[in-house]
Amino acid sequence: MPSEAHLSIDDLNTYLNAPDKAAAADLGHHLIRCEDCRSRMRDLALMRRHHRDLTASAADAVDPDLNRMSAEQALERYVDGRLSGEHRAQVETKIVNDPAAMRSALHYARHSAAMH
């Protein structure tokens, strides 16, 4: 990996899942040199810790209003802070359990200022 390239979300997740494994060694070396990637990793780790605290009951709840919303709309509203209560818990659970949803939420969060 070129030293100027930033780590992907998948790379950051690999490192967070097993920082002591040999596969994460190159990632760790990059993180030592790159403040941007360390910052993104801290944000990702914080998000993961927060989501671990969610209850299983939120995952089982199904709200018809949220089902009518597209997944993209739900993620946008979550990132923008426009979801609360049960809806927010459902989207958080989705993000925790679906790496693609987490990548989408992080991507939207990084680019939301330019999109508005």
Image (spheres, grey):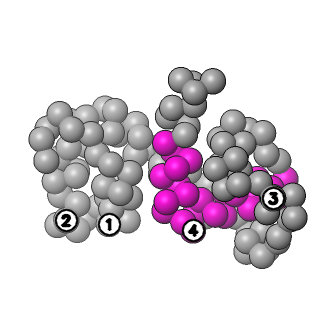
Residue beneath disc 3 = 68
Query: Disc 1, disc 3: CB below 8 Å?
Result: no
Give, as a three-letter code, the residue at label 2.
Ala
Q: Quadrant of residue 24?
A: bottom left
Mark 3 Cα within 10 Å, few/some/many (few <14, many 20+)?
Answer: few
- What whole-number distance in Å separates the C-alpha atoms at marks 1 and 2? 9 Å
Residue that mark 4 sits on = 97
Q: Earlier in the sequence, mark 4 or mark 2?
A: 2
Q: What element does badge 4 sit on?
A: helix
- The residue that label 2 is drawn on is 23
Instruction: Where is residue 56? Give x, y as percent.
Output: 73, 74
Density class for disc 4 (Cα within 10 Å; few <14, some 14-19, many ≥20) is few
Q: Which residue is mark 1?
A: 18
Q: Is residue 77 above or below residue 93?
A: above
Q: In whole angstroms, how far apart are the C-alphas of marks 3 and 2? A: 41 Å
* Magenta stretch, residue numbers: 85-107
- Mark 4 vs mark 1: which is more N-terminal? 1
Q: Residues within 10 Å of mark 1 (few under 14, many from 20)?
A: few
Taking the image as shown, residue 43 lies to the left or right of residue 75, namely left
Label 1 sits on a secondary structure element that is: loop
**In the rendering, at what x and y percent does residue 87 appear?**
80, 56
Distance from disc 4 to disc 1, alpha carbons, whole Å, reads 18 Å
Q: What secondary structure predominates along the stretch shown in magenta?
A: helix
Tell which circle, 1 or 2, labels the residue nearer the N-terminal end.
Answer: 1
Residues marked 4 and 2 touching at CB (< 8 Å): no
Residue 103 drawn in magenta: yes
